[in-house]
Amino acid sequence: MPKTAPLRPRRRQLAEPMASLGELLREWLPRQRWFAGKDRPVAELGLLSMTELFPGCLHLLVHTGQDAVPAPGGAPSAGDCYQLLLGVREQPSPRLGRAVIGQVRDGPLAGRTVYDALHDPRTAQLLLERLRHPGKAGPLRFESDPARPVPGGLAPRLLDAEQSNTSLIYGDEFILKLFRRVQPGVNPDLEVPDALARQGCGRVPAPVAWMRTTHPYEATLGVLQPFLHDASDGWTLSLDALAAGDDFTVQAHELGQTMGDVHLALASAFPAGPPGENDRTAAAMTERLNAAAHCVPALQPFVPGLRAAFAALTTCDSGPPAQRIHGDLHLGQVLRAGRDWFVIDFEGEPSRPLAERRSAHSPVRDIAGMLRSFDYAARQRRPWRPEWARRCREAFCAGYAARAGWDPRKKHGLLRAYETDRAVYEVLYEARHRPDWLPVPMAAIERLAVRGD
Ligand SMILES: Nc1ncnc2c1ncn2[C@@H]1O[C@H](COP(=O)(O)OP(=O)(O)O)[C@@H](O)[C@H]1O
Ligand SMILES: O=P(O)(O)O[C@H]1O[C@H](CO)[C@@H](O[C@H]2O[C@H](CO)[C@@H](O)[C@H](O)[C@H]2O)[C@H](O)[C@H]1O
């Protein structure tokens, strides 16, 4: 059993900066795909916990503070907590390549090279062993579902994908997602698939093991689940279909059916939310729009038209009851194996507070997310194929209506408001993470603000 935190006493809370290791991390963090605040320098960095996971591998939770620019929700950022696994070596090794963070100048690690240990197959193997044998390491807890044993000796590889987190694949049989941005509480990407598995919902891979911490607060750190090795994600499939000039309506219809089933299972697995209050929804959406327009000036000319979409909510019926939803549904979150669709990544929109992501929302929000995604896909090719997107959107809604018992197409005002809200989120997301993609949601903003369809 590895020893706990021998290198340095664990501090209770964020305290002084981490000397030269802190400088290295401050420079390295904003270059990581999963780092949320790329547009601002890391002004402060504090150590929340440090545990020796194995000899030569430290588990860290660090707090990053950035300048108080309004976050997507409108509130100034109070900072974030990130999970890091740091490999520590006496000598730099060329094999570590891009994983190297740097050489530490002073402090307990003086002279040693630190690197992102998730790029190290040995760390990945040892991590799987920890998950296979429930136990503790300092504040870290490794737990598993005894009904779903995981075999040993599976070869690891790092998932090479644009991700908000970091995932390791083991023997093409399991995938471990390590959450990079950690918030207090149970992560919905563990909570929801676990609850759905208990409902017997076969459309969501069930967690087999997970990792959590008890310090500085209770939080989920990672989830291991079956890897659907023969599946392709909906984004890739839709782009392939577009490139080949193929119709995608059969797949979109089946996807709508799957989402109808998943929403029904979610409604059974979690308590219903309070009855929808369109006034409050409109106010929250307007607030998010104002915050986004402050960060992305290109939105400003469209603000009056977009506000009208939210204001119109007050004259709509409240639609289907609020319930737990996926929260960040798009074509990259669905996998197709044979003719079956599966849904992954129940974390919700990463920039929203965890409490909000874990509360009940209108299922229309998920529908709007997927409808926006067909538009994103259609805009990846020139000439733009609006008809392709329109047919997919129609087929998806028809499939959904066949299972869920209500038809999104009959909720035009609600759908327009949620689609607008999602497009506003996407503008902010693209401005922060992929500025080249900004024209994609901006085109929708223009359409929704000006034509309203
Ligand atoms: N159970 C799974 N089976 C197969 N591939 C998966 C599975 N879970 C995730 N993936 C792949 O990993 C990618 C990233 O997973 P995701 O949960 O969306 O991570 P993130 O939240 O970091 O973006 C997905 O787009 C998919 O290609
Ligand atoms: O990392 P996540 O998958 O949790 O989600 C974030 O990143 C997505 C992009 O990778 C982003 O999705 C947007 O781009 C997709 C194409 O790459 C498109 O299919 C989606 O419709 C569009 O929203 C997502 O918004 C963001 O939360």
Image (tube, rainbow, N blue to C red):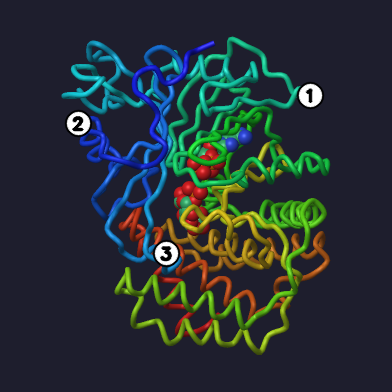
Q: Which amino acid, by three-letter code, is at mark 2?
A: Ser
In the picture of the structure, the residue carrying the numbered disc 1 is 147
The picture places residue 303, in percent across and down from the top left corner, at 40, 82
Picture layout, residue 121 above or below residue 201: above
Report the residue at 51% width, 87% height from top: 308
Which residue is identified by label 3? 72
Q: Quadrant of the C terminus?
A: bottom right
Q: Residue at left 41%, top 71%?
A: 443
Judging by the rendered image, the residue that carries numbered circle 2 is 20
What label sits on residue 309 in the rendered view?
none
Label 2, secondary structure: give it: helix
Of marks 2 and 1, which one's residue comes earlier in the chain? Answer: 2
Q: Nearer the viewer, mark 3 or mark 2?
A: 2
The extreme left residue here reads: 105
Estimate how packed mark 2 is, as few (under 14), some (14 to 19) or many (20 or more) residues with alpha carbons within 10 Å: some
Looking at the image, residue 444 sits to the left or right of residue 333; the answer is: left
